Amino acid sequence: MKRLLLLIAGLIGLAGCASVDIDKYRGQTPVLELRDYFDGTLDGHGVFQDRSGEVVRRFHVRIDASWAGEVGTLDEHFTYSDGSTQRRVWTITRLGEGRYVGRADDVVGEARGEAAGNALRWRYVLALPVDGKVYKVDFDDWMFLMDDRVMLNRSSMSKWGFRLGELTLSFYKRGG
């Protein structure tokens, strides 16, 4: 019985590590260039669903984005359906060959990103305050450029390999 439980736990752990390789999207268009898309003002609308699929939070985000050479700043202003607000400022550095690193005050360490074709994958740990406590949760964040103005974003949030919920977000680039 003990061996069976260890086998099941190991399989669950391996399943949590399985993921799509970013290179699967290399031939997809339009090609996502972060410096082009995240430049100017963008609007986003999103929902957070818990692991049962229930929408537990809705929000709007306005992003003021700019670049100085290889370094971009994304100044995000969130307004949630309950009226609360939040601000996050990302500093993103382009490393070349589709690789990026990002930092924000509530990101533990740095986010690592890879882009290929129309896709970008971010992986990072977020310090998430909940009911007076702060939890460090893992984000696996995928963005897909649909056209020059629209990007779709889907993030999976987990802790110790267990899925906590998902974030779905659509971005719309103003002007241009």
Image: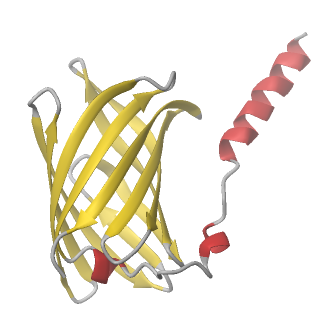
User: Relative to the observer, which residue lies in front, 140 or 59?
Assistant: 59
- The quarter of the picture where residue 172 lies is bottom left
Q: Is residue 57 above or below residue 15?
A: above
Q: Residue at x 39, y 74 (%)?
A: 147
Residue 54's image quarter? top left
Drawn side of residue 2 relative to residue 110, left or right = right
State the quadrant of the N terminus. top right
Could you tell me residue 103's position as x and y percent?
28, 61
The colour scheme applied to this rendered structure is: secondary structure
Tell me what residue is drawn at x 61 percent, y 79 percent: 26
Residue drawn at 67 percent across, 71 percent down: 24
Quarter location, residue 110: bottom left
The image shows residue 143 at horizontal and vertical percentages of 44, 61
**Residue that protrudes farthest toward the top in the picture:** 1
Image quarter (top left, top right, bottom left or bottom right) of the C terminus: bottom left
Q: Position of residue 135 (x, y in %)?
A: 35, 30
Counting from the top left corner in percent of width and height, residue 25 is at: 61, 73
Counting the numbered discs, the total is 0
Which residue is nearer to you in this view: 146 or 15? 146
120 vs 77: above or below: below
- Residue found 38% across the figure and 82% down from its top: 33
